[in-house]
Image (tube, helix red, strand yellow):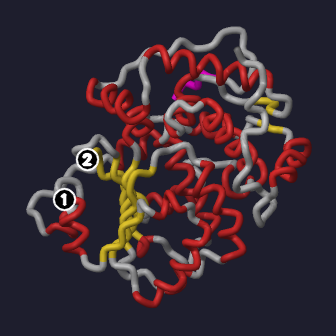
């Protein structure tokens, strides 16, 4: 794809946003996010001024669609959106082995795509995009947790650029059928202490529901331990389905593959569409690595509010909220 943005925090000219959302999504944005043309414009203007004056942000994208990822996730609360952007930049740099150097043409990323770990099923009746992850398709004998995080993050980075996804959010379905203990022991507690801020605060995407299907009984205790690192708000969005029928009754048959529903006609998934979009976004993914926040100086701000295990503050406040942006 043609890259039409830069990481210059004070460009000579900002892009002019033009809303192309279908009417259904405009209504959702107004009802759920308090978004309208005036609020959107004011929020973008203020966030750009805040970035320009931020003493530790050196380089950052300021194009509309990128910033709207944070603003929509935080329902146009400027302080909360700015705080999330700080976390996003800091975690990307602090854990580059997870979040940087993402390349859809990398052999591991290509192989995971071919193994059909990640499926984009389509948009449901509420306008939410439904993602299916098949645990059994992730080869624990070939790949590790870092590979999985990088692959999922690469997909979600590009998905979160879709404005319909920004507005309506994501429904995640995790099928644990035939998953082994090796799949669950991938998530070591030492890693979860670092992943916690990522799950709760880093990715600017509205995760509306998470459905876990056919979780093995032997894995229940491990899941309970992992839950200690998930925010209370996110916990309420988890649904555990003991049987396939229970999951289908809740999710419906419209988007699920026929292996789940026993229907005659296979729904047309959007996986190929988004797979192509990710390949076309190679240069965009590279440019994300050029964004920079001064970690050394910013770490002193984290220490004042208390840092979470792993060195990244899981509860830091937007320390530069009071910058003069009016």
Which residue is at a point 31% across and 74% down the rendered structure image?
Answer: 241
Report helix, strand or loop for mark 2: loop
Eyeballing the image, is 324 above or below 33? above
Residue 162 among magenta residues: no
Which residue is at a point 91% across and 42% down the rendered structure image?
Answer: 297
Residue 218 locus on image (x, y percent): 46, 90
Q: Is residue 75 left or right of residue 192?
A: left
Q: What stretch is highlighted in magenta?
A: 1-5
Which residue is at a point 30% across and 79% down the rendered structure image?
Answer: 242
Eyeballing the image, is 183 above or below 28? below
Closer to us: 139 or 125: 125
**Which residue is labeled 1 in the image?**
252
What is the CA distance from the residue labelled 1 to the residue labelled 2? 9 Å
The 10 Å Cα crowd at callout 2, few under 14, some 14 to 19, many 20 or more, is some
**Residue positioned most to the left:** 264
Closer to us: 233 or 264: 233
**Is residue 163 shown to the viewer in this render?**
yes
Q: Are marks 1 and 2 in contact (CB under 8 Å)?
A: yes
Residue 158 locus on image (x, y percent): 50, 41
**Picture quarter containing residue 85?**
top right
Specify the principal SS of the magenta part: loop
Classify the position of the C terminus by image quarter. Answer: top right
Report helix, strand or loop for mark 1: loop
Closer to us: 95 or 289: 95
**Which residue is labeled 2 in the image?**
124
Residue 295 locus on image (x, y percent): 85, 45
């Amino acid at each position: 794809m043609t890259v039409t943005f830069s990481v210059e925090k004070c460009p000579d000219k900002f892009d002019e946003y033009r809303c192309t959302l279908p009417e259904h999504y405009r209504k959702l944005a107004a009802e759920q996010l308090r978004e309208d043309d005036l609020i959107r414009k004011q929020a973008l203007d203020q966030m750009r001024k805040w970035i320009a004056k931020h003493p530790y942000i050196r380089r950052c994208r300021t194009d509309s669609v990128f910033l709207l990822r944070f603003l929509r996730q935080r329902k146009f609360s400027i302080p909360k959106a700015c705080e999330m952007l700080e976390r996003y930049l800091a975690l990307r740099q602090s854990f580059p082995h997870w979040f940087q150097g993402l390349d859809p043409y990398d052999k591991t990323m290509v192989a995971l795509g071919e193994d059909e770990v990640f499926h984009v099923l389509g948009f449901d009746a509420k306008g939410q995009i439904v993602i299916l992850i098949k645990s059994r398709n992730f080869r624990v004998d070939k790949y590790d947790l870092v590979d999985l995080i990088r692959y999922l993050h690469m997909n979600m980075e590009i998905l979160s650029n879709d404005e319909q996804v920004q507005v309506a959010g994501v429904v995640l379905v995790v099928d644990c059928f035939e998953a082994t203990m090796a799949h669950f022991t991938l998530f070591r507690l030492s890693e979860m202490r670092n992943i916690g801020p990522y799950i709760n605060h880093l990715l600017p995407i509205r995760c509306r529901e998470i459905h876990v299907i056919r979780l093995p009984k032997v894995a229940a205790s491990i899941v309970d331990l992992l839950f200690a690192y998930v925010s209370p708000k996110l916990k309420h969005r988890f649904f555990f389905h003991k049987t396939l029928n229970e999951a289908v009754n809740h999710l419906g048959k419209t988007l699920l593959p026929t292996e789940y529903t026993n229907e005659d006609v296979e729904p047309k998934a959007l996986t190929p569409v988004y797979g192509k979009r990710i390949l076309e976004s190679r240069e965009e993914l590279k440019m994300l690595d050029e964004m920079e926040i001064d970690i050394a100086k910013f770490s002193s701000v984290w220490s004042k509010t208390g840092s979470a295990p792993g060195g990244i503050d899981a509860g830091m406040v937007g320390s530069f909220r009071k910058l003069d942006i009016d």
